[in-house]
Image (spheres, grey):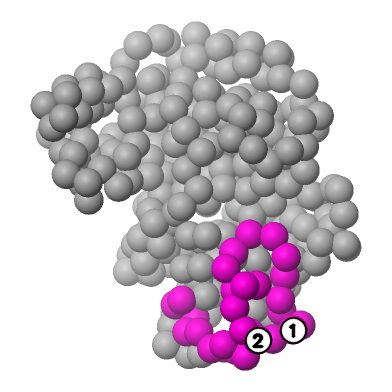
Amino acid sequence: MGDTRQETIEAIEREFAEFAGTAGVAARRLDTGEEIRVNADAATATASTIKVPILIELFRQIEAGQHRLDDRLAVSEATMAPGSGILRELSLGVELSLRDLATLMIVVSDNTATNMLIDLVGMERVNATMSALGFPHTQLRRRLDFPAIGHDARNLAVTTPADLAGIMTALATDAILTPTNCAAILDIMRRQHYVDLAPRYLPYFPYGPELGYPDNGLRIANKTGGWRGMRADMALIEWPRADGGVTRYAIGISTEGDPDTRFWAENAGDRLIGRVSRLIFDRFGGGELDAATATAAVETD
């Protein structure tokens, strides 16, 4: 499995020390219980990772019979939001099912879909459910209102890396909803289009099989978040091992205070999250996928 747990922690601490801002990470391997924690309980902004708690509350209310996934809502001027997503480019009044809004909120991080679902389920219910599930540090503070949020992403929502990892662990172990609904949430998250943070340096090729490459079995269900000078990701990462078992681990990671506030591929926070994610991946045995993936790519080409 490569370096010892302590060596991995020390490597992460060096990465954080060299970063111009602050950072924290929590990871838990589900089959062994091994944890990697560095600044795991430090408060941090969520940016769009808060959309996972919103999704959880939506499915909780669906379980309770308050809504159905086929229910439809219309985009209105009051819910329209700038930033990521596609609904801002469509016509006012377009109707979508709750299933489609949930998918847009996660897969392309659609801010308008997010506001529509916040209005539906209630901000206070999102927060109450997070507290009841054991994640009291994760709190939604307002809708996607850019002027109100300003430059401080904590005006939108707050969490900790430990909460982000804990939420993913709870989804992976069916601890918060029925197994069917936990699986439905993870299925949406596996279709994520933003894979430049925790998956950044992993041998992860979501479109590989569609292009004729062999499947190395690596699966990632994640949700990223980004604001001026901050980044975050929460993920469930899993793959089949050569011994017939499956390695699964949850990770929550965030950065704040990066003086580089640009949204571009080489942002320092993006790369830091990628490097730390790779250190944890290697610690939990993921290196065995590298050789298999490289061999398969050569054979296919």
Q: How many badges with numbers are in the image?
A: 2
Name the quadrant containing residue 48.
bottom right
Q: Is residue 8 magenta?
A: no
Main secondary structure along the magenta-highlighted residues: loop
Left or right? Give the position of 100 relative to 83. Answer: left
| Residue at the spot 47% in from the left edge and 43% down from the top edge | 195
Placement of the N terminus among the 4 image quadrants: top left
Whole-percent x, y for residue 286 in the image: 32, 25
Q: Nearer the viewer, residue 33 or 259?
A: 259
Whole-percent x, y for residue 172 in the image: 38, 51
- Near mark 2 (Cα within 10 A), the count class, few <14, some 14-19 or many ≥20, is some
Mark 2 and mark 1 residues within 8 Å of each other at the beta carbon: yes
Q: Which residues are magenta?
A: 73-100
Regarding mark 2 in the picture, which secondary structure is present there?
loop
Q: Is residue 79 above or below residue 226?
A: below
Q: Nearer the viewer, residue 226 or 157?
A: 226
Regarding mark 1 in the picture, which secondary structure is present there?
loop
Whole-percent x, y for residue 192 in the image: 44, 54
Q: Is residue 203 above or below residue 48?
A: above
Q: Is residue 82 magenta?
A: yes
Placement of the C terminus among the 4 image quadrants: top left
Whole-percent x, y for residue 30 in the image: 37, 38
Question: Which is nearer the N-term, disc 2 or disc 1?
Answer: 1
- Near mark 1 (Cα within 10 A), the count class, few <14, some 14-19 or many ≥20, is few
Q: Nearer the viewer, residue 68 or 39?
A: 68
Residue 238 in sight here: no
Q: Which residue is mark 1?
A: 77
Q: Which residue is mark 2?
A: 92
The type of residue carrying mark 1 is Glu
| Residue at the spot 74% in from the left edge and 50% down from the top edge | 158
